[in-house]
Image (cartoon, helix red, strand yellow):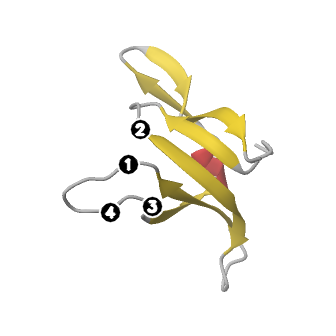
Amino acid sequence: MNAQIKPGTYRHFKGKTYEVLGVAHHSETLEELVVYRALYTTKKYPYGSLWARPREMFAGMVVSNGRRLKRFRHLKAKT
């Protein structure tokens, strides 16, 4: 899979929104990781908490309620 990951706002298939900051490389394996931050607050994590996920997983598909969906759907580009 070679999906282009653009900085901007994305919605996770479970409904929460995130801002993708960019794609980084793991220092040992050179694996591509998508770096993004949460646009919401939980009891455990503050607004803007940073996350990283392998590019293949970020751009991949999931099955939810019998439907095949993108794990993250691009909403708008960063301006």
Q: Quadrant of residue 23?
A: bottom right
Identify the mark at residue 16; answer none if there is no mark. Answer: 2
- The residue to which callout 4 is attached is 46
Q: Secondary structure at mark 4?
A: loop
Q: Which mark is residue 40?
A: 1
Residue 54 rendering spot, x and y as whole percentages: 60, 59
Quadrant showing the N terminus: top right
Rendered residue at 47%/15% (across/down): 67
Q: CA distance from mark 3 to mark 4?
A: 6 Å
Across and down, in percent, residue 47 comes to: 38, 58
Mark 3 belongs to which amino acid?
Gly
N-term mark: 4 or 2 = 2
The crowd level at tag 4 (other Cα within 10 Å; few <14, some 14-19, many 20+) is few
- Distance from the alpha carbon under mark 1 to that under mark 2: 7 Å
25 sits to left or right of 67? right
What separation in Å lies between label 4 and label 2 (alpha carbons)? Answer: 14 Å
**Disc 2 on helix, strand or loop?**
loop
Residue 4 at x, y percent in the picture: 80, 45
SS category of the residue bearing label 1: loop
The nearer-to-camera label among 3 and 2 is 3
Residue carrying label 3: 48
Asked whether the residues under the numbered discs 1 and 2 touch, taking CB atoms below 8 Å apart as contact, a structural biologist would say yes
Characterize the local packing of mark 2: few (<14), some (14-19) or many (20 or more) Cα atoms within 10 angstroms.
few
